[in-house]
Image (cartoon, helix red, strand yellow):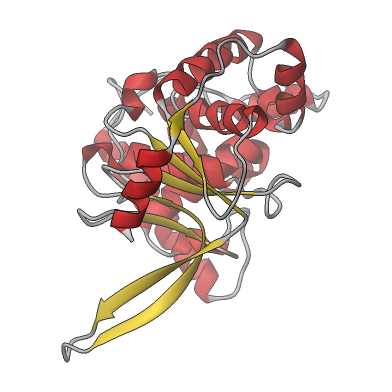
Amino acid sequence: MFDTLKRWLNRARRSEIATPTPELWARVEARLPFLDFLPEEARLRLRALAVAFLGEKEFYGARGLRINDDIMLSIALQACLLILKRGLAAYRGWVGIIVYPGDFVVPRQVMDEAGIVHEYNDQLLGEARRDGPVIVAWFDGGSPGPGVNVIVHEFAHKLDMANGNADGFPRLLPGMSRRQWADVFTTAYGRLCRLDDSGIETILDPYAASNPGEFFAVASEAFFETPLSLRAEFPAVYAQLSAYYGLDTAEGEAQASGFRFATGFGMGRNTSENSNGGGDRMKP
């Protein structure tokens, strides 16, 4: 499969969006209502990052999908949400973004303990490779499900892979406590797994219980899409993600909804994949 991906990327062309028109900005941002959770200064910074991102990355439409400015700008805005505190350097070292029209199938091979190779197909919404492309499904109607954000999920994996495997322990910002991050996420992940085993639903997609890397990616989706709910149900996780992404999206959602809530958490900063890649988001 990787050889096929490389051929696709060789055929991809770099985006030539220079300065999006006001009409394009308005049209694309209207389909991303969670951007309203950002303060004005962050919105302006996000736009600038998105344009720079488009100048560095290459897009390819798989399975006949025609890539247009709306798709590229939407992906760029959502990907850059995660790096508002880091800048484009966080996404250096790779260039390709492959976009499918909906979910897609990836053939897999697994060898069992007896040495027998089993072949099967994974039906996915996205996949990220540590040193390779990001692959995402595109849905004209928006998200494939409530609170699901394939773009945020896969680019969270990319950040997670910056220091090795996608294991739910990304490279933290200066001043953040590695011990506190590990304690918070280990505790929350264990709790989620127990609830999932008991059939009890939470704000997080059950796919978060797959492994710590998926927990981080799914929690990142909730941080941007449904932050008030995440803060209510997993407050310590929300606090860590607020420090990591440099945003208080829950307060932004409260203000966008016309209410004032006590923030609960400040912006203070003390508060896995194998070498071949991975970071899949399976179809629900």
Q: Residue furthest front?
A: 11
In this picture, residue 164 sits left or right of residue 39: left
Residue 182 visible: yes
Q: Quadrant of residue 264?
A: top right
**Percent position (x, y) of residue 275?**
20, 53
Q: Quadrant of residue 172?
A: top left
**Percent position (x, y) of residue 260?**
76, 22
In this picture, residue 264 sits left or right of residue 119: right
The count of marks equals 0
Quadrant showing the C terminus: bottom right
In this picture, residue 281 sits left or right of residue 171: right
Q: Residue at x 42, y 44 (%)?
A: 134
Q: Residue at x 71, y 25 (%)?
A: 29
Quadrant showing the N terminus: bottom left
Q: Residue at x 56, y 18 (%)?
A: 17
**Percent position (x, y) of residue 62?**
52, 50
Q: Residue at x 35, y 36 (%)?
A: 159
188 to 264, vertically: above or below: below
47 to 125, vertically: above or below: above
Residue 260 visible: no
140 to 174, vertically: above or below: below
**Percent position (x, y) of residue 186?**
35, 53
The residue closer to the viewer here, 232 or 166, is 166
The residue closer to the viewer here, 176 or 60, is 60
235 to 273, vertically: above or below: above
The residue closer to the viewer here, 66 or 154, is 66
